[in-house]
Amino acid sequence: MMIIFLLIIAVVKEISTFQPEFVESISNVSVAVGRDATFTCHVRHLGGYRVGWLKADTKAIQAIHENVITHNSRVTVSHLDQNTWNLHIKAVAEEDRGGYMCQLNTDPMKSQIGFLDVVIPPDFVAEDTSSDVIVPEGSSVKLTCRARGYPEPIVTWRREDGNEIVLKDSMGTKTLVSSFRGEVLKLTKISRNEMGSYLCIASNGVPPSVSKRISLSIHFHPVIQVPNQLVGAPLGTDVQIECHVEASPKSINYWIKDTGEMIVSSSKYHVQELSKSMYETKMTMIVRNFHKDDVGSYRCIAKNSLGEVDSSIRLYEIPGPNRKVPASNKHAVGSDADTNDILKQKQLRVTYQPDDEDLYGSAEDFDDSDSPLPPPLTPNVYYTSANGVSHKHATHKPGVVGLGPDAVGGRHHHYNAVNGGGTLEFGIGLPGSINGNGVTRKPPFYGKTEIRGNAMDNNELTSAAWSKTVTAITLTRTRTTTTTPTIIQLSIAFWCWRWWYCCCWQ
């Protein structure tokens, strides 16, 4: 009996020594909704014991050993050997989220729990999300994106074109941000440069993130900006004019000539539009082979449902690079060409009667320390004799000053103007005064007179031929010529006549 008792005790000890136990804990599982999830329970020394699976929160039995108890067709069990037991949930749903217990029917019962986290990628709630928006410029608007998912998604706003979002507080202070976090984006007192597409992006760490594109259209009446309202071009060239239009909705743009004729693309004109943004358009028109008939005004017109606007550009002719200059004017510079044209129109005539060249002395004898500085010299000057025959002064010599043929006024230049039967030549001139039908200029201490016809006034003389005149310098070495005979002269003449009469005639 003692031997049997000892044997029973040894068997009980052996059995208790090899009772089932868990080798490792069950791993938690996180899976997106619609995907499959698997829990694995590792045991050893299972022997004749069984493995059961239960839903921890509801205590609902899912399976016992190899048999599925639940009526959920998505639940199955499997095992590789007596040590590895699996619970499979296919296409998990949100209600499958929770804890799952692996239980051994030992006494006392042994169990362990693994948790199933069913995550849901973000998605937008259509009824609570804005669609495309159209608002007038200067108003306020709210853009809304409601998102759902598990965990709760975060909504971020960005501009599709990469520009910054303009936020304004209650005081109207502007803040520029590259992104904004929140389901509602509020834009106040919006301007046209805020027009565009806005992206709301929802993410919660579960791929994929989702985004929605909301187009914001801002309506305003057309506006035209013209870079150049006056455009000049030489004849025979192609000239381009342009207008920059801002309008929303898009405007109808066209060109009209000052005659009222609408301009379309042809062999003469090339009309083109280039869209620069949602509301900016560049209008260009090229006039080919520009000629005098093309001179005038051209209007660019923009029209949309909110209004109409136009702007005018004037084309004019400018001298081309190949314009020929008369040979007689080849030395003319600056405003002298304009002076020559004025002289031609006024038919200005100058009569010059030169005095004896002995009247003029050397500039070395003249002390100009107290004299005011004379105005600049007229570079292109000619003279005409009293009989209308034109003549040109001799080559100027440095150091000689005056109005005679040898007079020097600096550099020698020429201007020609047709004057009746002769060529009008101007040299160093003197200011004149109106005298009867002409203008008489009287240089001090000289007996010569210059007369100008056509009754030009002082303003015309100043703006035209005499814009660069200089007052002739009074020379110190002059010789006085009197026209009234003195008593000595009469006496000498009388005795000479008496001597000649007595000697020759007697």
Image (cartoon, helix red, strand yellow):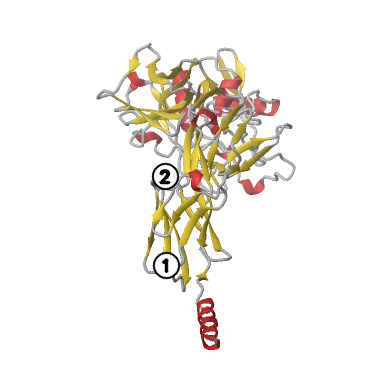
Q: Are marks 1 and 2 in contact (CB under 8 Å)?
A: no
- The residue nearer to you, when weighing 472 against 266, is 266
Say which element carries label 2: loop
Residue 360 placement: quadrant: top right
Of residues 389 and 3, the one drawn nearer to the viewer in this rendering: 3
Label of residue 152 in the image: none
Q: Quadrant of the N terminus?
A: bottom right
Q: Nearer the viewer, residue 61 or 304?
A: 61
Q: Nearer the viewer, residue 131 or 240?
A: 131
**Amino acid type at mark 2:** His
Q: Earlier in the sequence, mark 1 or mark 2?
A: 2
In percent of width and height, residue 413 lies at: 46, 39
How many badges with numbers are in the image? Answer: 2
Tell me the crowding category of disc 1: few under 14, some 14 to 19, or many 20 or more residues within 10 angstroms, Cα based. Answer: some
- Asked which secondary structure carries label 1, the reply is strand
Q: Identify the residue at horizontal 24%, vertical 25% (top origin).
A: 267
Q: Residue at x 46, y 70 (%)?
A: 46
- Tell me where residue 200 appears, x and y as whole percent: 52, 39
**Residue at 52% from the left image edge and 88% from the top image edge:** 3
Residue indicated by mark 1: 84
Which residue matches tag 2? 71
Question: Percent from the top left, x then y, of residue 9?
Answer: 55, 82
- Neighbor class of circle 2 (other Cα within 10 Å; few <14, some 14-19, many 20+) is few
- Quarter location, residue 85: bottom left
Q: CA distance from mark 1 to mark 2?
A: 23 Å
